[in-house]
Image: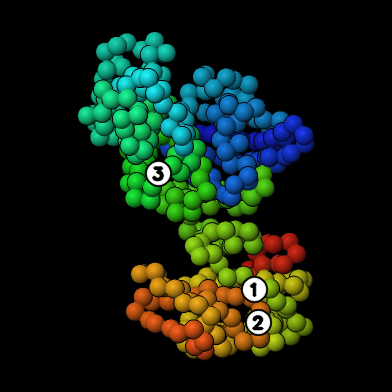
Amino acid sequence: MSEVELKKIVKIFPGGTKALDEIDLSIKDRELMVILGPSGCGKSTLLRIVAGLEKASDGRVFIDEQDVTEQEPGTRDIAMVFQNYALYPHMTVFKNIAYGLKNRKISSDEINRRVKEVAETLQIEEYLDRKPSQLSGGQRQRVAMGRAIARNPKVFLFDEPLSNLDAKLRIQVRLEISRLQSELGVTSLYVTHDQVEAMTLGHRLVLMNEGRIEQIGEPLQVYELPETLFVAGFIGSPPMNLVPGELNEKGEFILGSTVKIKLDDFQTKSKNLTLGIRPEHLLTDESGKVTLGKFIVENYERQGADNYLYGKINGISHSLTIRVPPDTVYSVGTAINLSCEKKKLHFFCSETGLRIENK
């Protein structure tokens, strides 16, 4: 088993900046967990602490129930893949992959066997005699992954490994990472700011914000049931529509001067709420049970499979985004009767940002 346990991890940099605020996290054996969040949220710092490249100000790191907090990186039996590849430019691909094995005093025959096996797995056999400068970005990233795989570590750590690749290569290498992790069964921690990577790669994902964990869960669970306003606004492309309003004494949620939504069995002491609706859940007709009023199209984008309307509901100042079928065409200024199914509405306390269950 190769479980990773982080307990009350705190990181304070010189000058008093708190990068991590009591992070508790458990990565299961053979799990690929993705850490997602905006730049500066602390995700790479957390990964470096697991690797031993950064020392926590407080808290403990456990790998296989062993406290490795004070151990050096080389003794933790982890392998890390960076976004900048970190290959030795003067060495061939073979020597780059074999470097870590050679340092561990593994026999030449075993090194040759492992390098050949890894090269076949990653389809880089023909590049073994080349140097990194003779490879494309995708090929270099394969070599970096090969070096990590050859070590047969307890834990893989990925630090935004696809950031330097173009869009087509990102898809290709992402699929390779998913396949390899599944085949090898190595516990993995993967840091990214890319939502597509997080949603497609992770068995579970951790969404971080300002050094804290906002939510942990399976990707679809986080998408469908965001626990905070931050998660609702971050997950999804385009993100969830978020519109502030008020809950009156009759149990009606009031949006602007025109929209009233009756809420049954809605228990909250908060009066200031924020309504969240995914763009794909807004209906451009009156088929939904919740009527939202007249929507005026201010812009229309055709993106092939996904087309979008941008505009406002009469009497409401906040803009909305609507995903519409690719075969529909709208003109700027068109008025649409907007509706939604009640079960697709999300509510959050505007003050705390926490989710309120809509029964």
In the foreground, 195 or 8: 195
Tag 3 secondary structure: loop
Q: Position of residue 300 (x, y in %)?
A: 46, 77
Amino acid under label 1?
Val
Q: Which residue is mark 1?
A: 243
Counting residues from the N terminus, which is met first, the one under dot 1 or under dot 2? 1
Residue at the disc numbered 2: 316
Where does label 3 land, which residue?
A: 165
Categorize mark 2 by other alpha carbons within 10 Å: few (<14), some (14-19), many (20+). some
The residue most toward the front is 133
Check disc 2 and give the amino acid type: Ile
**Badge nearest the viewer, 1 or 2:** 2
Question: What residue sits 61% from the left and 36% below the top?
Answer: 45
Residue at x-position 59% and y-position 81%: 312
For the residues marked 1 and 2, what is the alpha-carbon distance in whole angstroms?
9 Å
Which quarter of the figure is the C terminus placed in? bottom right
Corner quadrant of residue 324 = bottom left
Which residue occupies 44% across, 73% down? Answer: 301
- Labels 3 & 1 near each other (Cβ < 8 A): no
The answer to whether residue 310 is above or below residue 128 is: below
Label 3: how many residues lie within 10 Å, few (<14), some (14-19) or many (20+)? some
As rendered, which of 33 and 317 lies closer to the eye? 317
Look at the picture and state if 258 lies above or below 199: below
For the residue marked with disc 3, what is the amino acid?
Leu
Disc on the earlier residue, 2 or 3: 3
Q: Are marks 1 and 2 in contact (CB under 8 Å)?
A: yes
